[in-house]
Structures are given as structure tokens and as C-alpha cells.
Amino acid sequence: MFEHLGQPPLTRWAFALRLARHFVVTSALMVASVGAGMLGYMHYEHLDWREAFLNSAMLLGGMGPVDAPKSDAGKIFAGMFALYSGLVFLIVAGVLLAPVVHRVVHLFHWRRGRGG
């Protein structure tokens, strides 16, 4: 997926495209996650779509829910969605940072290997 040690680093334009692709993938994951959270809050807590959006977005953003769940099923859903949100946060951070970290390490080793 990324260039190997013997290959030269990507141009700035190609690197920007790589970052854009990673951003698109993580954005799709976030949109799907907000949608799933909205459906869950609408189904289990009978919230309207605006309140469901707010609660799922706040959980995915790490802030916590706005409305405390009232039903037992809603409490279980909110707990599971909170755990899922923590994993999504780690995945998004990793996917967004991977190209940057790889580029820094690759530049260091590529220059070092060429006597720089």
C-alpha cells in the first residue's frame, strides 16, 4: 500500500491524494456510524432524528450522550454504541495518521540510506 524503503518518497501532490483518500474512507466510516447511532436512538429511545443525531454525534465525538437513556434496551444500546464509538475513534485516528507517520519515517530512512 505504501512505498517501500528503496523507493523514493511520494511527491507532495501524490501524498495529498493519499491523505484525501484516507480522509474519504474515515469520513464514510463516521457517516455510517452516525447513521447507525441515529437509527438505534430512534428505535430504542424513540427520539426524533435531530435528537438522535445529537446523541450519536456527541458519543462519537467523545463527549457523551445528551439525553440519558430511559428504557432498558436504550441503556444497553447506548452502552454498546459508546464502546463502538471508542473503537471508531481509534480507527479513525490510526487511518488518518498512518500516511503522515509513514512519510516521516520513510523520509528519515530514505535519506539515511542515500547518505543524507
Image: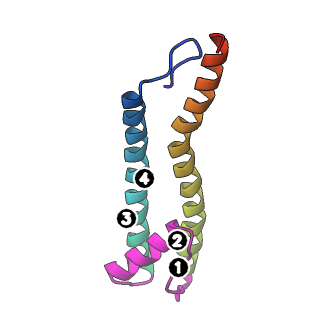
- Crowd around label 2: few <14 · some 14–19 · many ≥20 (10 Å): many
Q: Earlier in the sequence, mark 1 or mark 4?
A: 4
Q: Earlier in the sequence, mark 2 or mark 4?
A: 4
| Pick the front one: 61 or 109 | 109
Q: Residue furthest left?
A: 49
Q: CA distance from mark 3 to mark 1?
A: 15 Å
Residue at 59% from the left image edge and 36% from the top image edge: 101
Q: Earlier in the sequence, mark 2 or mark 1?
A: 2
Q: Earlier in the sequence, mark 4 or mark 3?
A: 4
Image spot of residue 5 (x, y percent): 59, 16
Image spot of residue 45 (x, y percent): 44, 83
Magenta-drawn segment: 45-74
- Crowd around label 1: few <14 · some 14–19 · many ≥20 (10 Å): some
Mark 4 belongs to which amino acid? Leu
In the picture of the structure, the residue carrying the numbered disc 2 is 59
Badge number at residue 65 = 1
Residue 6 appears left or right of 26: right
Up-down: is 3 above or below 77? Answer: above
Q: Secondary structure at mark 4?
A: helix
Mark 3 belongs to which amino acid? Gly
Residue 116 appears left or right of 36: right
- Crowd around label 3: few <14 · some 14–19 · many ≥20 (10 Å): some
Residue at 54% from the left image edge and 56% from the top image edge: 88
What is the quadrant of the C terminus in the image?
top right
> Is residue 46 in the magenta section?
yes
Q: CA distance from mark 2 to mark 1?
A: 6 Å
